[in-house]
Image (tube, rainbow, N blue to C red):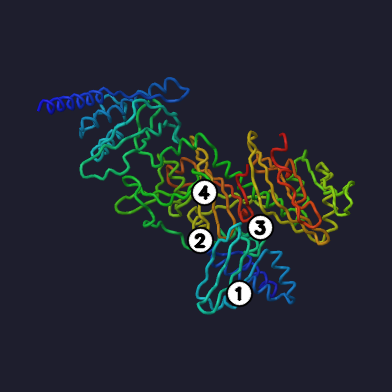
Amino acid sequence: MRKALTAIFSLFFSVTLFAIGPQEELEAFVSRYLAMLESLPALEDKKARMLEDQIKISGSPDCMHYADKKEFRFSGNGRGEFLCSRTGKGDFCISFPLDYSLISGKSKIELEKELPAALLSFSGYDIPLDSEKYIKEFRNVYKCGGNKYYSEEVLNVSYAVRTENQLTPLIDIRYPRESVMTLLTEPEAGKGFDLEIMFVRYGYKNEVINLPLNSFLSYMITSGCIPYVGIEKIGPTEISASLFLVNERLGYNHVLKVTIFSESLKNKNGIVKSRMNAFIPTWNLSDLYSK
Amino acid sequence: MKKKLLTAILISIIISMGVVSAQNKSFSASLETTDGVLKSKIEESLVSLVSAFNRAGETGSDMLDLTGANVSEETEKSLAMLWKNIHFCCPVNSFKEILSSTVDNNYQVRNIPIKLLPEPGVDAGDRYREAVVDFDCNGRILSFYFGLDNNLYRNIVMDNSVEDLRFRQTILDYVEHFRMAYEQKDLDFLEQVFSEDVLIITGKVIRTRKSDSIFLDQEDVSIKYNTYGKSDYLRRLKEIFNTAKYIKVKFTDVKVSRHPTKKGFYGVLVKQGYDSGYYSDEGYVFMLWDFTDENKPQIHVRTWQPYWIDDTKSVKLPEDRIINLVDFEI
Protein backbone atom coordinates (compact mmCIF):
# COMPACT_ATOMS: atom_id res chain seq x y z
CA MET A 1 0.00 0.00 0.00
CA ARG A 2 2.75 2.36 1.04
CA LYS A 3 4.73 1.46 -2.09
CA ALA A 4 1.70 2.14 -4.29
CA LEU A 5 1.12 5.51 -2.64
CA THR A 6 4.78 6.43 -3.09
CA ALA A 7 4.60 5.47 -6.76
CA ILE A 8 1.50 7.64 -7.32
CA PHE A 9 3.08 10.50 -5.37
CA SER A 10 6.33 10.36 -7.34
CA LEU A 11 4.47 10.10 -10.66
CA PHE A 12 2.38 13.15 -9.77
CA PHE A 13 5.42 15.21 -8.97
CA SER A 14 7.67 13.97 -11.75
CA VAL A 15 5.27 14.83 -14.58
CA THR A 16 4.14 18.41 -15.00
CA LEU A 17 0.47 17.91 -15.78
CA PHE A 18 -0.04 21.47 -16.90
CA ALA A 19 2.13 24.21 -18.30
CA ILE A 20 2.89 26.97 -15.85
CA GLY A 21 3.98 30.47 -16.76
CA PRO A 22 7.62 31.58 -16.54
CA GLN A 23 6.92 34.01 -13.67
CA GLU A 24 5.50 31.21 -11.50
CA GLU A 25 8.44 28.95 -12.38
CA LEU A 26 10.94 31.64 -11.45
CA GLU A 27 9.19 32.31 -8.14
CA ALA A 28 9.12 28.57 -7.39
CA PHE A 29 12.84 28.38 -8.18
CA VAL A 30 13.72 31.27 -5.87
CA SER A 31 11.68 29.78 -3.00
CA ARG A 32 13.21 26.33 -3.53
CA TYR A 33 16.75 27.67 -3.77
CA LEU A 34 16.42 29.75 -0.60
CA ALA A 35 14.99 26.74 1.26
CA MET A 36 17.92 24.63 0.06
CA LEU A 37 20.41 27.24 1.26
CA GLU A 38 18.57 27.40 4.59
CA SER A 39 19.06 23.67 4.99
CA LEU A 40 22.85 23.97 4.69
CA PRO A 41 24.19 24.32 8.24
CA ALA A 42 27.49 26.12 7.66
CA LEU A 43 27.86 29.56 6.11
CA GLU A 44 30.87 28.29 4.16
CA ASP A 45 28.71 25.58 2.54
CA LYS A 46 26.11 28.17 1.55
CA LYS A 47 28.79 30.37 0.00
CA ALA A 48 30.40 27.47 -1.84
CA ARG A 49 27.06 26.36 -3.25
CA MET A 50 26.19 29.86 -4.41
CA LEU A 51 29.60 30.21 -6.04
CA GLU A 52 29.15 26.92 -7.83
CA ASP A 53 25.68 27.87 -9.08
CA GLN A 54 26.83 31.42 -9.90
CA ILE A 55 24.11 32.90 -7.66
CA LYS A 56 24.30 36.32 -6.04
CA ILE A 57 21.92 37.48 -3.30
CA SER A 58 21.41 40.92 -1.81
CA GLY A 59 18.92 42.02 0.87
CA SER A 60 16.87 39.89 3.22
CA PRO A 61 15.04 36.83 1.82
CA ASP A 62 12.21 37.58 4.30
CA CYS A 63 11.15 40.27 1.86
CA MET A 64 9.83 37.43 -0.37
CA HIS A 65 6.92 36.89 2.05
CA TYR A 66 5.63 40.42 2.38
CA ALA A 67 6.71 41.95 -0.96
CA ASP A 68 4.10 44.02 -2.78
CA LYS A 69 6.14 44.02 -5.99
CA LYS A 70 7.81 41.04 -7.59
CA GLU A 71 9.63 41.60 -10.81
CA PHE A 72 11.91 39.68 -13.16
CA ARG A 73 14.44 41.41 -15.36
CA PHE A 74 17.29 40.41 -17.66
CA SER A 75 20.69 41.53 -16.46
CA GLY A 76 22.72 40.56 -19.57
CA ASN A 77 25.25 37.79 -20.30
CA GLY A 78 22.63 35.07 -19.95
CA ARG A 79 21.65 36.16 -16.45
CA GLY A 80 18.41 37.28 -14.85
CA GLU A 81 17.36 38.94 -11.61
CA PHE A 82 14.33 38.40 -9.47
CA LEU A 83 13.48 41.45 -7.39
CA CYS A 84 11.06 41.65 -4.48
CA SER A 85 10.32 44.93 -2.79
CA ARG A 86 7.97 46.55 -0.35
CA THR A 87 7.89 50.28 0.18
CA GLY A 88 9.66 51.20 3.38
CA LYS A 89 10.87 47.67 4.09
CA GLY A 90 13.72 47.34 1.58
CA ASP A 91 14.45 45.08 -1.33
CA PHE A 92 15.61 41.57 -1.95
CA CYS A 93 17.37 40.59 -5.18
CA ILE A 94 18.61 37.23 -6.39
CA SER A 95 20.74 37.14 -9.53
CA PHE A 96 21.16 33.83 -11.35
CA PRO A 97 22.20 32.33 -14.70
CA LEU A 98 19.18 31.59 -16.92
CA ASP A 99 20.06 27.92 -16.88
CA TYR A 100 16.79 25.97 -17.05
CA SER A 101 18.31 22.93 -15.36
CA LEU A 102 19.12 25.12 -12.37
CA ILE A 103 15.73 26.90 -12.47
CA SER A 104 13.67 23.71 -12.83
CA GLY A 105 15.90 21.61 -10.58
CA LYS A 106 15.97 18.92 -13.29
CA SER A 107 18.66 17.76 -15.68
CA LYS A 108 18.13 18.12 -19.43
CA ILE A 109 17.77 14.34 -19.64
CA GLU A 110 14.84 14.46 -17.18
CA LEU A 111 13.27 17.45 -18.92
CA GLU A 112 13.48 15.75 -22.34
CA LYS A 113 11.95 12.59 -20.89
CA GLU A 114 9.05 14.39 -19.20
CA LEU A 115 8.01 16.70 -22.03
CA PRO A 116 6.05 14.16 -24.17
CA ALA A 117 3.91 13.12 -21.18
CA ALA A 118 3.40 16.75 -20.16
CA LEU A 119 2.23 17.64 -23.67
CA LEU A 120 -0.14 14.68 -23.89
CA SER A 121 -1.71 15.43 -20.53
CA PHE A 122 -1.95 19.19 -21.07
CA SER A 123 -5.22 20.23 -19.52
CA GLY A 124 -4.96 23.98 -20.01
CA TYR A 125 -7.29 25.86 -22.28
CA ASP A 126 -6.63 26.41 -25.98
CA ILE A 127 -5.63 29.99 -26.66
CA PRO A 128 -8.26 31.68 -28.87
CA LEU A 129 -7.47 34.16 -31.65
CA ASP A 130 -7.15 37.65 -30.19
CA SER A 131 -8.64 39.86 -32.90
CA GLU A 132 -7.45 43.04 -31.16
CA LYS A 133 -3.85 42.13 -31.92
CA TYR A 134 -4.52 41.98 -35.67
CA ILE A 135 -3.98 45.07 -37.80
CA LYS A 136 -5.42 45.53 -41.28
CA GLU A 137 -2.76 44.70 -43.84
CA PHE A 138 -4.56 44.83 -47.15
CA ARG A 139 -8.20 44.53 -48.20
CA ASN A 140 -9.71 41.88 -45.89
CA VAL A 141 -6.34 40.47 -44.78
CA TYR A 142 -5.11 41.23 -41.24
CA LYS A 143 -1.68 40.69 -39.73
CA CYS A 144 -0.46 40.09 -36.18
CA GLY A 145 3.11 40.46 -34.97
CA GLY A 146 6.10 40.64 -37.28
CA ASN A 147 9.08 40.43 -34.91
CA LYS A 148 12.07 38.65 -36.35
CA TYR A 149 14.44 36.13 -34.78
CA TYR A 150 18.08 36.39 -35.96
CA SER A 151 17.02 36.41 -39.65
CA GLU A 152 14.64 38.58 -41.69
CA GLU A 153 12.99 35.35 -42.75
CA VAL A 154 12.27 33.94 -39.30
CA LEU A 155 9.25 35.73 -37.94
CA ASN A 156 6.59 35.66 -35.27
CA VAL A 157 3.75 36.59 -37.59
CA SER A 158 0.25 35.35 -38.35
CA TYR A 159 -2.45 36.37 -40.79
CA ALA A 160 -6.23 36.33 -40.62
CA VAL A 161 -9.07 37.02 -43.02
CA ARG A 162 -12.15 39.06 -42.10
CA THR A 163 -15.40 37.47 -43.18
CA GLU A 164 -18.75 38.71 -41.86
CA ASN A 165 -17.17 40.75 -39.07
CA GLN A 166 -15.15 37.79 -37.83
CA LEU A 167 -11.45 37.10 -38.11
CA THR A 168 -10.44 33.59 -39.08
CA PRO A 169 -6.82 32.41 -39.39
CA LEU A 170 -5.49 32.47 -42.94
CA ILE A 171 -5.04 28.91 -44.19
CA ASP A 172 -5.08 29.10 -47.97
CA ILE A 173 -3.12 27.01 -50.45
CA ARG A 174 -2.57 30.11 -52.60
CA TYR A 175 -0.59 31.71 -49.74
CA PRO A 176 1.62 28.81 -48.62
CA ARG A 177 4.17 30.93 -46.80
CA GLU A 178 1.65 33.03 -44.91
CA SER A 179 -0.52 29.98 -44.15
CA VAL A 180 2.37 28.01 -42.66
CA MET A 181 3.50 31.02 -40.61
CA THR A 182 -0.07 31.31 -39.28
CA LEU A 183 -0.46 27.57 -38.68
CA LEU A 184 2.65 27.42 -36.51
CA THR A 185 2.17 30.62 -34.50
CA GLU A 186 -1.59 31.04 -34.02
CA PRO A 187 -3.09 28.22 -31.90
CA GLU A 188 -6.58 28.79 -33.35
CA ALA A 189 -5.23 28.00 -36.85
CA GLY A 190 -4.08 24.57 -35.71
CA LYS A 191 -7.61 23.29 -35.06
CA GLY A 192 -8.16 20.29 -37.30
CA PHE A 193 -4.44 19.57 -37.65
CA ASP A 194 -2.57 16.86 -35.76
CA LEU A 195 1.10 17.26 -34.96
CA GLU A 196 3.37 14.23 -35.07
CA ILE A 197 6.52 14.94 -33.05
CA MET A 198 9.65 12.86 -33.13
CA PHE A 199 11.59 13.92 -30.04
CA VAL A 200 15.37 13.79 -30.30
CA ARG A 201 16.53 12.65 -26.88
CA TYR A 202 19.90 12.23 -25.21
CA GLY A 203 21.93 9.34 -26.62
CA TYR A 204 20.46 9.49 -30.16
CA LYS A 205 17.19 8.11 -28.80
CA ASN A 206 13.84 9.02 -30.33
CA GLU A 207 10.23 9.01 -29.19
CA VAL A 208 7.17 9.76 -31.32
CA ILE A 209 3.87 11.22 -30.12
CA ASN A 210 0.76 12.69 -31.76
CA LEU A 211 -1.36 15.51 -30.41
CA PRO A 212 -3.60 18.32 -31.70
CA LEU A 213 -1.50 21.15 -33.10
CA ASN A 214 -3.51 23.85 -31.29
CA SER A 215 -2.99 22.05 -27.97
CA PHE A 216 0.78 21.91 -28.61
CA LEU A 217 1.00 25.62 -29.41
CA SER A 218 -1.21 26.58 -26.46
CA TYR A 219 1.06 24.57 -24.11
CA MET A 220 4.18 26.21 -25.49
CA ILE A 221 2.82 29.77 -25.37
CA THR A 222 1.53 29.22 -21.81
CA SER A 223 5.03 28.02 -20.84
CA GLY A 224 6.43 31.36 -22.02
CA CYS A 225 7.71 30.33 -25.47
CA ILE A 226 7.38 32.73 -28.39
CA PRO A 227 6.99 30.91 -31.73
CA TYR A 228 9.11 32.09 -34.68
CA VAL A 229 8.77 30.44 -38.09
CA GLY A 230 11.04 30.34 -41.13
CA ILE A 231 10.15 28.69 -44.42
CA GLU A 232 12.93 26.44 -45.71
CA LYS A 233 11.42 25.10 -48.92
CA ILE A 234 8.15 25.23 -50.81
CA GLY A 235 7.97 22.05 -52.88
CA PRO A 236 5.27 20.58 -55.12
CA THR A 237 3.79 18.32 -52.44
CA GLU A 238 5.11 19.64 -49.15
CA ILE A 239 6.46 22.69 -47.40
CA SER A 240 9.43 22.52 -45.01
CA ALA A 241 9.67 25.01 -42.20
CA SER A 242 11.61 25.61 -39.00
CA LEU A 243 9.78 26.45 -35.81
CA PHE A 244 11.82 28.12 -33.06
CA LEU A 245 10.05 28.22 -29.69
CA VAL A 246 12.05 30.80 -27.81
CA ASN A 247 11.80 31.03 -24.03
CA GLU A 248 14.00 33.99 -23.16
CA ARG A 249 13.04 34.12 -19.49
CA LEU A 250 13.88 30.51 -18.78
CA GLY A 251 16.94 30.41 -21.04
CA TYR A 252 16.00 27.64 -23.46
CA ASN A 253 14.64 27.05 -26.98
CA HIS A 254 12.78 24.19 -28.59
CA VAL A 255 13.57 23.77 -32.29
CA LEU A 256 11.35 21.84 -34.70
CA LYS A 257 11.87 20.92 -38.31
CA VAL A 258 8.31 20.82 -39.64
CA THR A 259 6.81 19.29 -42.80
CA ILE A 260 3.36 20.45 -43.91
CA PHE A 261 1.74 18.57 -46.77
CA SER A 262 0.07 20.70 -49.44
CA GLU A 263 -2.92 18.36 -49.35
CA SER A 264 -3.42 19.16 -45.64
CA LEU A 265 -3.16 22.86 -46.34
CA LYS A 266 -5.72 22.53 -49.12
CA ASN A 267 -8.14 20.56 -46.91
CA LYS A 268 -7.40 22.67 -43.83
CA ASN A 269 -6.77 19.53 -41.78
CA GLY A 270 -4.39 16.58 -41.62
CA ILE A 271 -1.04 15.59 -40.16
CA VAL A 272 1.88 17.95 -39.68
CA LYS A 273 5.15 16.05 -39.17
CA SER A 274 8.01 17.32 -37.06
CA ARG A 275 11.32 16.51 -35.46
CA MET A 276 12.00 18.29 -32.20
CA ASN A 277 15.11 19.16 -30.21
CA ALA A 278 13.86 20.27 -26.82
CA PHE A 279 15.26 22.43 -24.03
CA ILE A 280 18.26 23.67 -25.97
CA PRO A 281 20.23 25.85 -23.55
CA THR A 282 20.73 29.42 -24.73
CA TRP A 283 21.90 31.07 -21.49
CA ASN A 284 25.54 30.16 -22.13
CA LEU A 285 25.55 31.19 -25.79
CA SER A 286 27.87 34.05 -26.57
CA ASP A 287 27.84 34.17 -30.38
CA LEU A 288 25.66 32.05 -32.67
CA TYR A 289 27.22 33.60 -35.78
CA SER A 290 30.86 33.70 -34.84
CA LYS A 291 33.30 34.53 -37.64
CA MET B 1 -0.50 88.14 -73.54
CA LYS B 2 1.64 86.65 -76.30
CA LYS B 3 3.90 85.12 -73.66
CA LYS B 4 0.90 83.51 -71.86
CA LEU B 5 -0.39 82.03 -75.13
CA LEU B 6 3.01 80.55 -75.93
CA THR B 7 3.22 79.02 -72.43
CA ALA B 8 -0.26 77.48 -72.82
CA ILE B 9 0.66 75.98 -76.21
CA LEU B 10 3.89 74.61 -74.77
CA ILE B 11 2.09 73.04 -71.78
CA SER B 12 -0.54 71.42 -74.02
CA ILE B 13 2.20 69.99 -76.28
CA ILE B 14 3.99 68.52 -73.23
CA ILE B 15 0.73 67.03 -71.89
CA SER B 16 -0.20 65.52 -75.26
CA MET B 17 3.30 64.04 -75.60
CA GLY B 18 2.88 62.42 -72.19
CA VAL B 19 -0.46 60.88 -73.16
CA VAL B 20 0.94 59.58 -76.43
CA SER B 21 3.91 58.02 -74.67
CA ALA B 22 1.68 56.45 -72.03
CA GLN B 23 -0.63 54.97 -74.63
CA ASN B 24 2.28 53.59 -76.61
CA LYS B 25 3.88 52.02 -73.54
CA SER B 26 4.14 48.27 -74.10
CA PHE B 27 4.89 45.64 -71.53
CA SER B 28 7.22 42.68 -71.96
CA ALA B 29 7.95 39.76 -69.66
CA SER B 30 10.86 37.39 -69.51
CA LEU B 31 10.54 34.31 -67.29
CA GLU B 32 13.34 32.02 -66.20
CA THR B 33 12.52 28.37 -66.89
CA THR B 34 14.07 25.52 -68.83
CA ASP B 35 10.77 24.60 -70.56
CA GLY B 36 10.73 26.77 -73.69
CA VAL B 37 7.15 25.97 -74.74
CA LEU B 38 5.76 26.66 -71.28
CA LYS B 39 7.82 29.87 -71.05
CA SER B 40 6.35 31.38 -74.21
CA LYS B 41 2.77 30.38 -73.29
CA ILE B 42 2.97 31.89 -69.82
CA GLU B 43 4.84 35.00 -70.95
CA GLU B 44 2.18 35.62 -73.59
CA SER B 45 -0.65 35.25 -71.05
CA LEU B 46 1.10 37.49 -68.54
CA VAL B 47 1.75 40.21 -71.12
CA SER B 48 -1.89 40.22 -72.27
CA LEU B 49 -3.15 40.40 -68.68
CA VAL B 50 -0.82 43.22 -67.61
CA SER B 51 -1.50 45.11 -70.85
CA ALA B 52 -5.24 44.91 -70.09
CA PHE B 53 -4.59 46.47 -66.66
CA ASN B 54 -2.45 49.22 -68.20
CA ARG B 55 -5.01 50.03 -70.92
CA ALA B 56 -7.95 50.21 -68.52
CA GLY B 57 -5.87 52.10 -65.97
CA GLU B 58 -4.75 54.76 -68.40
CA THR B 59 -8.22 55.40 -69.80
CA GLY B 60 -9.81 55.28 -66.34
CA SER B 61 -12.31 52.70 -67.56
CA ASP B 62 -14.44 50.85 -65.02
CA MET B 63 -14.47 47.83 -67.31
CA LEU B 64 -11.48 45.55 -67.59
CA ASP B 65 -11.28 44.26 -71.14
CA LEU B 66 -9.73 40.78 -71.05
CA THR B 67 -10.61 39.89 -74.63
CA GLY B 68 -7.92 37.61 -76.01
CA ALA B 69 -6.32 37.03 -72.62
CA ASN B 70 -6.00 33.39 -71.57
CA VAL B 71 -7.89 33.70 -68.27
CA SER B 72 -10.08 31.13 -66.52
CA GLU B 73 -13.75 32.04 -66.17
CA GLU B 74 -13.54 32.19 -62.37
CA THR B 75 -10.52 34.49 -62.45
CA GLU B 76 -12.16 36.73 -65.03
CA LYS B 77 -15.10 37.21 -62.65
CA SER B 78 -12.92 37.90 -59.62
CA LEU B 79 -10.78 40.36 -61.62
CA ALA B 80 -13.92 42.22 -62.78
CA MET B 81 -15.00 42.53 -59.12
CA LEU B 82 -11.54 43.63 -58.05
CA TRP B 83 -11.44 46.24 -60.82
CA LYS B 84 -14.72 47.73 -59.61
CA ASN B 85 -13.02 48.51 -56.27
CA ILE B 86 -9.53 49.48 -57.33
CA HIS B 87 -7.68 50.43 -60.49
CA PHE B 88 -4.01 49.76 -61.00
CA CYS B 89 -1.26 49.44 -63.59
CA CYS B 90 2.21 48.02 -63.92
CA PRO B 91 4.76 50.83 -63.57
CA VAL B 92 7.56 49.00 -65.45
CA ASN B 93 7.91 48.28 -69.17
CA SER B 94 9.87 45.07 -68.86
CA PHE B 95 9.72 42.42 -66.18
CA LYS B 96 12.03 39.52 -65.39
CA GLU B 97 11.28 36.81 -62.84
CA ILE B 98 11.64 33.11 -62.06
CA LEU B 99 8.76 30.84 -63.08
CA SER B 100 8.19 28.56 -60.10
CA SER B 101 6.08 25.45 -59.53
CA THR B 102 3.27 25.57 -57.02
CA VAL B 103 2.27 23.01 -54.43
CA ASP B 104 -0.71 21.91 -56.57
CA ASN B 105 1.39 21.21 -59.70
CA ASN B 106 0.68 24.52 -61.41
CA TYR B 107 3.00 27.46 -62.07
CA GLN B 108 3.45 30.79 -60.41
CA VAL B 109 4.98 34.20 -61.14
CA ARG B 110 5.53 36.43 -58.12
CA ASN B 111 6.79 39.97 -57.47
CA ILE B 112 4.97 41.63 -60.42
CA PRO B 113 5.16 45.35 -59.56
CA ILE B 114 1.75 47.00 -59.34
CA LYS B 115 0.89 50.66 -58.75
CA LEU B 116 -2.58 51.40 -57.36
CA LEU B 117 -4.12 54.37 -59.15
CA PRO B 118 -5.40 57.24 -57.01
CA GLU B 119 -9.12 57.51 -56.44
CA PRO B 120 -10.97 60.62 -55.30
CA GLY B 121 -11.63 60.64 -51.55
CA VAL B 122 -9.50 57.55 -50.90
CA ASP B 123 -6.40 57.73 -48.73
CA ALA B 124 -3.33 57.36 -50.94
CA GLY B 125 -1.54 55.12 -48.40
CA ASP B 126 0.94 52.60 -49.70
CA ARG B 127 0.40 52.68 -53.45
CA TYR B 128 2.86 49.98 -54.45
CA ARG B 129 2.11 46.28 -54.27
CA GLU B 130 3.45 43.10 -55.75
CA ALA B 131 1.10 40.73 -57.54
CA VAL B 132 1.14 36.95 -57.89
CA VAL B 133 -0.31 35.10 -60.88
CA ASP B 134 -0.94 31.35 -61.03
CA PHE B 135 -1.01 29.48 -64.36
CA ASP B 136 -1.80 25.97 -65.48
CA CYS B 137 0.48 24.03 -67.83
CA ASN B 138 -1.24 25.59 -70.88
CA GLY B 139 -0.49 29.10 -69.69
CA ARG B 140 -4.08 29.69 -68.63
CA ILE B 141 -4.36 32.19 -65.77
CA LEU B 142 -5.91 30.46 -62.74
CA SER B 143 -5.69 33.27 -60.21
CA PHE B 144 -4.44 36.78 -59.66
CA TYR B 145 -3.82 38.22 -56.20
CA PHE B 146 -1.60 40.61 -54.32
CA GLY B 147 1.35 39.27 -52.32
CA LEU B 148 1.39 40.15 -48.64
CA ASP B 149 5.07 40.67 -47.97
CA ASN B 150 7.25 41.78 -50.81
CA ASN B 151 10.35 39.92 -51.90
CA LEU B 152 10.26 37.28 -49.19
CA TYR B 153 9.74 34.42 -51.60
CA ARG B 154 12.78 35.56 -53.53
CA ASN B 155 14.83 35.44 -50.33
CA ILE B 156 13.68 31.90 -49.61
CA VAL B 157 14.72 30.73 -53.08
CA MET B 158 18.08 32.50 -53.00
CA ASP B 159 19.27 31.81 -49.46
CA ASN B 160 18.85 28.89 -47.06
CA SER B 161 19.55 30.93 -43.96
CA VAL B 162 16.57 29.38 -42.15
CA GLU B 163 18.06 25.89 -42.37
CA ASP B 164 21.41 27.29 -41.28
CA LEU B 165 19.83 28.90 -38.20
CA ARG B 166 18.10 25.62 -37.36
CA PHE B 167 21.41 23.72 -37.71
CA ARG B 168 23.23 26.21 -35.48
CA GLN B 169 20.57 25.90 -32.77
CA THR B 170 20.33 22.12 -33.04
CA ILE B 171 24.11 21.89 -32.67
CA LEU B 172 23.73 23.61 -29.29
CA ASP B 173 21.47 20.72 -28.31
CA TYR B 174 24.08 18.12 -29.26
CA VAL B 175 26.83 20.15 -27.57
CA GLU B 176 24.75 19.98 -24.36
CA HIS B 177 24.28 16.21 -24.81
CA PHE B 178 28.04 15.92 -25.34
CA ARG B 179 28.69 17.87 -22.10
CA MET B 180 26.26 15.65 -20.20
CA ALA B 181 27.94 12.50 -21.50
CA TYR B 182 31.03 13.37 -19.39
CA GLU B 183 28.92 13.98 -16.29
CA GLN B 184 27.03 10.71 -16.91
CA LYS B 185 30.36 8.91 -17.59
CA ASP B 186 28.57 7.66 -20.70
CA LEU B 187 31.27 6.05 -22.85
CA ASP B 188 28.67 4.46 -25.14
CA PHE B 189 27.34 7.85 -26.23
CA LEU B 190 30.85 9.28 -26.66
CA GLU B 191 31.71 6.23 -28.77
CA GLN B 192 28.76 7.12 -31.03
CA VAL B 193 29.36 10.86 -31.20
CA PHE B 194 33.08 10.70 -32.08
CA SER B 195 33.67 9.76 -35.71
CA GLU B 196 35.95 6.79 -36.37
CA ASP B 197 38.71 9.11 -37.63
CA VAL B 198 38.29 11.69 -34.86
CA LEU B 199 41.32 13.78 -33.97
CA ILE B 200 41.64 14.58 -30.26
CA ILE B 201 44.15 17.22 -29.23
CA THR B 202 44.92 18.14 -25.64
CA GLY B 203 47.30 20.86 -24.56
CA LYS B 204 49.52 21.02 -21.51
CA VAL B 205 51.32 24.09 -20.25
CA ILE B 206 55.08 23.53 -20.04
CA ARG B 207 57.12 25.96 -17.99
CA THR B 208 60.89 26.24 -18.06
CA ARG B 209 62.93 28.76 -16.11
CA LYS B 210 64.43 31.36 -18.40
CA SER B 211 68.08 30.46 -18.78
CA ASP B 212 69.21 34.07 -19.04
CA SER B 213 67.24 35.24 -16.01
CA ILE B 214 68.56 35.49 -12.49
CA PHE B 215 65.02 35.49 -11.09
CA LEU B 216 63.58 32.11 -10.20
CA ASP B 217 59.99 33.12 -11.07
CA GLN B 218 60.74 34.11 -14.68
CA GLU B 219 59.62 31.32 -16.95
CA ASP B 220 59.23 30.50 -20.62
CA VAL B 221 55.71 29.26 -21.14
CA SER B 222 54.87 26.92 -23.98
CA ILE B 223 52.03 24.53 -24.64
CA LYS B 224 52.75 20.95 -25.54
CA TYR B 225 50.05 19.29 -27.58
CA ASN B 226 49.25 15.57 -27.57
CA THR B 227 47.10 13.96 -30.22
CA TYR B 228 44.95 10.86 -29.79
CA GLY B 229 42.82 8.65 -31.98
CA LYS B 230 39.36 7.52 -30.94
CA SER B 231 40.27 4.28 -29.16
CA ASP B 232 43.26 5.78 -27.29
CA TYR B 233 41.22 8.73 -26.04
CA LEU B 234 38.25 6.59 -24.96
CA ARG B 235 40.62 4.20 -23.12
CA ARG B 236 42.12 7.13 -21.20
CA LEU B 237 38.65 8.49 -20.51
CA LYS B 238 37.50 5.12 -19.18
CA GLU B 239 40.32 5.20 -16.61
CA ILE B 240 39.34 8.70 -15.55
CA PHE B 241 35.67 7.71 -15.27
CA ASN B 242 36.62 4.73 -13.12
CA THR B 243 38.71 6.74 -10.68
CA ALA B 244 36.68 9.95 -10.40
CA LYS B 245 33.83 9.94 -7.88
CA TYR B 246 31.99 12.48 -9.93
CA ILE B 247 32.60 14.71 -12.95
CA LYS B 248 31.17 18.17 -13.37
CA VAL B 249 31.53 19.93 -16.71
CA LYS B 250 30.32 23.45 -17.41
CA PHE B 251 30.21 25.09 -20.85
CA THR B 252 30.03 28.88 -21.08
CA ASP B 253 30.81 31.50 -23.73
CA VAL B 254 29.61 29.20 -26.53
CA LYS B 255 30.48 30.35 -30.07
CA VAL B 256 29.22 28.72 -33.27
CA SER B 257 30.78 29.22 -36.69
CA ARG B 258 29.95 27.67 -40.05
CA HIS B 259 32.53 26.28 -42.44
CA PRO B 260 32.70 28.73 -45.35
CA THR B 261 32.52 26.14 -48.10
CA LYS B 262 31.74 22.73 -46.64
CA LYS B 263 27.99 22.51 -46.11
CA GLY B 264 26.91 20.99 -42.81
CA PHE B 265 30.26 21.49 -41.04
CA TYR B 266 30.24 23.73 -37.98
CA GLY B 267 32.85 24.72 -35.43
CA VAL B 268 31.86 25.19 -31.79
CA LEU B 269 34.19 26.85 -29.31
CA VAL B 270 33.32 26.81 -25.60
CA LYS B 271 34.95 27.80 -22.36
CA GLN B 272 34.96 24.63 -20.25
CA GLY B 273 35.07 24.28 -16.49
CA TYR B 274 36.00 20.75 -15.36
CA ASP B 275 35.86 19.38 -11.82
CA SER B 276 36.26 15.79 -10.65
CA GLY B 277 36.92 16.39 -6.96
CA TYR B 278 40.66 15.73 -6.93
CA TYR B 279 41.33 17.62 -10.15
CA SER B 280 39.84 20.73 -11.76
CA ASP B 281 40.76 22.98 -14.66
CA GLU B 282 39.48 25.64 -17.03
CA GLY B 283 40.08 25.51 -20.75
CA TYR B 284 38.87 26.13 -24.26
CA VAL B 285 37.24 23.21 -26.02
CA PHE B 286 36.84 23.33 -29.77
CA MET B 287 34.64 20.82 -31.58
CA LEU B 288 34.28 20.31 -35.31
CA TRP B 289 30.76 18.99 -35.88
CA ASP B 290 29.68 17.22 -39.03
CA PHE B 291 25.97 17.79 -39.51
CA THR B 292 25.55 16.11 -42.87
CA ASP B 293 23.50 13.36 -41.21
CA GLU B 294 21.01 15.41 -39.20
CA ASN B 295 19.88 12.35 -37.26
CA LYS B 296 23.37 11.48 -36.08
CA PRO B 297 25.80 14.39 -36.12
CA GLN B 298 29.42 13.49 -35.37
CA ILE B 299 32.53 15.15 -34.01
CA HIS B 300 35.63 14.97 -36.23
CA VAL B 301 37.91 17.12 -34.08
CA ARG B 302 37.93 17.85 -30.36
CA THR B 303 40.66 20.01 -28.85
CA TRP B 304 41.40 21.25 -25.37
CA GLN B 305 43.67 24.19 -24.51
CA PRO B 306 44.31 25.75 -21.10
CA TYR B 307 42.48 28.98 -20.29
CA TRP B 308 45.24 30.20 -17.95
CA ILE B 309 48.86 29.76 -18.86
CA ASP B 310 50.33 30.70 -15.48
CA ASP B 311 49.94 29.32 -11.96
CA THR B 312 48.53 32.52 -10.49
CA LYS B 313 45.68 32.57 -13.05
CA SER B 314 46.52 36.04 -14.26
CA VAL B 315 47.65 35.32 -17.85
CA LYS B 316 45.07 34.00 -20.29
CA LEU B 317 45.83 32.07 -23.45
CA PRO B 318 46.07 34.75 -26.16
CA GLU B 319 43.01 34.82 -28.40
CA ASP B 320 45.02 34.29 -31.58
CA ARG B 321 46.32 31.01 -30.17
CA ILE B 322 42.87 29.53 -29.54
CA ILE B 323 42.24 26.68 -31.97
CA ASN B 324 39.32 27.35 -34.28
CA LEU B 325 37.64 26.23 -37.50
CA VAL B 326 40.23 27.87 -39.74
CA ASP B 327 42.99 25.68 -38.29
CA PHE B 328 41.67 22.54 -39.98
CA GLU B 329 41.54 21.46 -43.59
CA ILE B 330 38.47 19.36 -44.25
The numbered mark 4 sits on a residue in which chain?
A: A
Residue A89, position as x, y percentages in the image: 54, 79
The numbered mark 1 sits on a residue in which chain?
A: A
Other-residue count near label 1 (Cα within 10 Å), few / some / many at <14 / 14–19 / ≥20 = some
Residue A32, position as x, y percentages in the image: 63, 71
The reply to whether the C-beta atoms of the residues labelled 4 and 2 are less than 8 Å apart is no
Disc 1 residue type?
Gly
Q: Report which residue position mark 4 lands on.
A: A149
Q: Report which residue position mark 1 lands on.
A: A59
For image coordinates 53% across by 57% down, the residue present is A225
Mark sitting earlier along the chain (2/1): 1
Judged by depth in the image, the label closer to the viewer, 3 or 4, is 4
Numbered badge on residue A222: 2
Q: In terms of secondary structure, where does tag 2 sit?
A: helix
Disc 4 residue type?
Tyr
Whether discs 3 and 1 lie on one chain: the answer is: yes
